Amino acid sequence: MIGKTRQIDTEPRGILVPRLAMGTFRHERLAPCAQLAGLVEHYWFVGWDMHGHPPQQQETLPHPNVHLVIEHDSDGVYGVHTARYTKLLAGQGFAFGIKFRPGGFRPFLGRAVAEIADQRVALAQVFGSDGNALARQVRACAPASAPHAMAAAAQAFLLARLPLPDADTGRAAALVAAIAADPALLTVDALAAQAGSNKRALQRLFQQYVGVGPKWVIKRYRMHEAVAQLQAGAAVELAQLALRLGYYDQAHFIKEFTALVGKPPGAYLRHLRPPATR
């Protein structure tokens, strides 16, 4: 029996534009069944309607996850995206995705996940013609029940291809979860000590199962923390925030923030404020 999916109500991290200025935007996340919980973080659905409005740009920060994405007009498996992801939302459309846990796509891919970083791989290259059939099935779902129907189709697809257990899959996911949960975990040395491993073994595990190195993961989650604090609206002293996140000084923090987010922290904070409060 295939377990039912359930809604995830916690706020997602990494969305740089929490609210679009115009049009309608729908975003839902659904948890996988117990059999897939070690491999899949969640299913996600976004739908938009910009008719009568100019296109709106949505941007998100990268996560150390592989996504299988099916849109109204394209599909593919996307390796870890190391830069800011930008999409122009125009007209009406949707995207459905499977967000695999760090390490969770390695058993399906059968090779180092680092080999597909910053790449789109055709579904047929990983799953053969069945991948294309899944895309057709997802697109055929009725709009009213789209997220749950799409997730059910994806879940049945993955359960039919459930890989053999792999201890390193869970180990990679646990290490990434530890980085995400502990803002004070700032170095690969500290992670290696916590994992009871050496840095070289840790690098190999991350390249094989996560797709990027542990240093990249640490820096990206610290940047997620910076964006979350700015979005929370609390007064933030940038020099103190930079030190808490492991930067040598405020200048290095601002430089990396600007490179990833596209604007310095002060400008991003002003962008978040509604016009009436400026």
Image (spheres, helix red, strand yellow):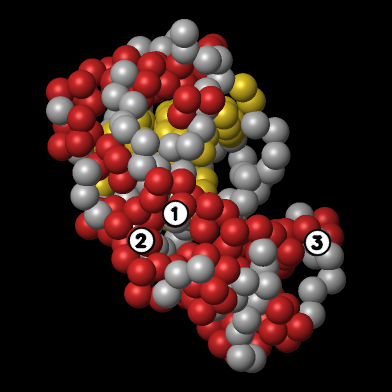
Q: Quadrant of residue 29?
A: top right
Mark 1 touching mark 2, by CB under 8 A?
Answer: yes
Tell me the distance, in whole angstroms, between the alpha carbons under discs 1 and 2: 7 Å
Name the quarter where the C terminus is drawn: bottom right
Tell me the distance, in whole angstroms, between the alpha carbons under discs 3 and 2: 37 Å
Numbered disc in front, either 3 or 2: 2
The spot of residue 83 in percent (x, y) is 41, 63
Q: Secondary structure at mark 3?
A: loop
Answer with mark 1 or mark 3, whichever residue precedes in sequence.
Answer: 1
| Residue at 56% in and 20% down | 5
The spot of residue 186 in percent (x, y) is 59, 76
Q: Which residue is mark 2?
A: 205
Mark 3 touching mark 2, by CB under 8 A?
Answer: no
Q: Which mark is residue 172?
A: 1
| Residue at 52% in and 23% down | 33
Q: Secondary structure at mark 1?
A: helix
Numbered disc in front, either 1 or 3: 1
Amino acid at pointer 3: Gly
